[in-house]
């Protein structure tokens, strides 16, 4: 595992966090001033995303164009290689890499490492290569299909607050957990690809996403600024969409993308947004999900989205009208939301909500929350922790 570096120091200095070869984020954006050598080739630690039954994706970036692959296996003596092919040829045209590991046995622990060779020259019939960079071995484990127990960590609205991220990172260092969900406004206003990479690396470092599968649910701040429409090149969203579902063993998680917090016609969007259509699309998704075998057969069900349905304080609340009729028929055990920057809890039935609603806190040291969702057998419990590590609330679900 990588050693941690203070998010406060590195974010203040504009450096990539979590990188075992930390260097100015600006160097990533510029193709010209690139120090050579394998040690500077990998931008930051890899992060695990888009876990599906029997597969997971390893994402990472290089500072320069490179030939990359992942070596993985049940132990370091039985490794196989995976690489990304595009229409028959290896993908070497971009510094963003996503390598799909398939044929994995659920319940089995795997080790893996990322390897990269810099492509110094790349012409039709002539190529030259640099040295090979290899990360240390890391490990992960996919759940078995009927597995009931897990510990999940859900955070929201970090807004790149270095103090909060350092505090949560310190807690996570001492915890055992299986996976992490960032429930929006954790990658705020990406201005450039380098900026987006810097923020993803910081979050992934905090969550130790190199060994814990991680999902980034989109909040309204992720969809602002110049690089917001480019985030798919850096994130392993399920099915290439910003909403979706996954099963952790016997528990189903359904994640929605609420879009912006003001109407599409608001002048600040200059006519470039159509979240109305994206929200409607998710009605179809929810209806299909409701009928799906993984959802119907799940022992527990968790709904995750950034802007609240029932604990929303915004004037504009399009999701409630659209989604409430279908989600109300989906027998969720809890609805986890965010956005308002203050912790909130609604017991089932108190405001027409058919299931309990938990709203995570904000980005200040006083108000930030880390939700730790623990399932042990049939029992599902949500522990709400503050930045000092104290459990401020325990909710049986
Ligand atoms: Fe928000």
Image (spheres, rainbow, N blue to C red):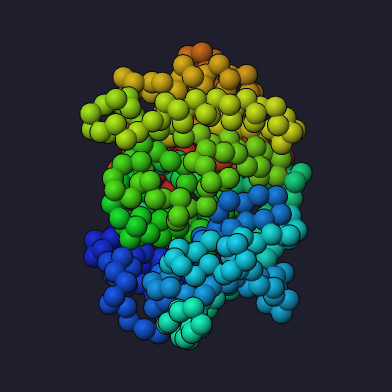
Which residue sits at x=46%, y=31%?
278
Counting from the top left corner in percent of width and height, residue 300 is at: 67, 33
Q: Is residue 106 visible?
A: yes
Q: How far from the left and from the top, in percent, is residue 275?
A: 40, 30
Report x, y in % for residue 94: 44, 65
Image quadrant containing the C terminus? top right
Nearest to the observer: residue 197 or residue 365? 197
Residue 355: quarter of image? top right
1 over 395 or under it: above or below = below
Residue that protrudes farthest toward the front in the picture:
124
Left or right: residue 385 compared with residue 316 = right
Query: Relative to 15, is 233 above or below?
Result: above
Q: Find residue 362 and report its horizontal and vertical position in percent.
A: 34, 38
Tell me which residue sits at (50%, 64%) in the image: 97
Check the image and report above or below for 262 versus 188.
Answer: above
Viewer-closest of 138 and 273? 273
Q: Is residue 202 something that shows in the picture?
A: no
**Residue depicted at x 41% and y 50%:** 231
Tell me where residue 15 sits by quadrant: bottom left
What count of labels does the image hold? 0
Residue shown at the point (46%, 50%) measured from the top left: 232
């Amino acid at each position: 595992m990588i050693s941690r570096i203070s998010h406060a120091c590195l974010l203040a200095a504009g450096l990539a966090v979590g990188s075992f070869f930390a260097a100015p984020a600006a160097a990533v954006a510029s193709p010209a001033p690139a120090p050579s050598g394998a040690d500077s080739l990998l931008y930051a630690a890899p992060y695990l995303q888009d876990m599906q039954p029997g597969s997971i994706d390893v994402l990472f970036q290089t500072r320069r164009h490179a030939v990359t692959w992942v070596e993985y296996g049940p132990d370091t003596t039985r490794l196989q290689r995976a690489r990304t092919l595009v229409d028959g040829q290896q993908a070497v045209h971009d510094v963003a890499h996503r390598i799909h590991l398939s044929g994995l046995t659920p319940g089995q622990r795997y080790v893996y490492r990322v390897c990269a060779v810099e492509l110094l020259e790349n012409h039709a019939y002539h190529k030259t290569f640099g040295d090979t960079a290899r990360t240390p071995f890391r490990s992960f484990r996919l759940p078995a299909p009927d597995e009931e127990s897990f510990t999940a960590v859900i955070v929201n609205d970090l807004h790149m607050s270095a103090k909060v991220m350092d505090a949560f990172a310190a807690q996570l260092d001492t915890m055992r957990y299986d996976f992490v969900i960032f429930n929006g406004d954790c990658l705020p206003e990406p201005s450039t690809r380098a900026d987006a990479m810097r923020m993803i690396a910081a979050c992934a470092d905090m969550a130790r996403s190199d060994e814990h599968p991680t999902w980034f649910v989109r909040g309204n701040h992720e969809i602002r600024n110049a690089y917001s429409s480019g985030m798919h090149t850096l994130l392993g969203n399920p099915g290439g969409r910003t909403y979706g579902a996954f099963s952790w063993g016997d528990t189903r998680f359904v994640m929605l993308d609420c879009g912006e917090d003001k109407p599409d016609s608001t002048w600040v969007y200059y006519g470039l947004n159509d979240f109305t259509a994206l929200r409607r699309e998710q009605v179809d998704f929810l209806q299909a999900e409701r009928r799906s075998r993984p959802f119907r057969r799940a022992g527990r069900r968790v709904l995750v989205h950034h802007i609240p349905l029932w604990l929303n304080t915004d004037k504009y609340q399009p999701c409630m009208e659209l989604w409430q009729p279908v989600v109300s028929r989906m027998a969720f055990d809890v609805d986890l939301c965010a956005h308002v920057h203050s912790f909130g809890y609604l017991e089932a039935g108190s405001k027409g909500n058919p299931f309990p609603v938990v709203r995570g806190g904000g980005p200040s040291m006083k108000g930030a929350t880390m939700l730790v969702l623990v399932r042990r057998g049939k029992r599902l419990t949500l522990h709400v922790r503050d930045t000092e590590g104290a459990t401020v609330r325990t909710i049986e679900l």
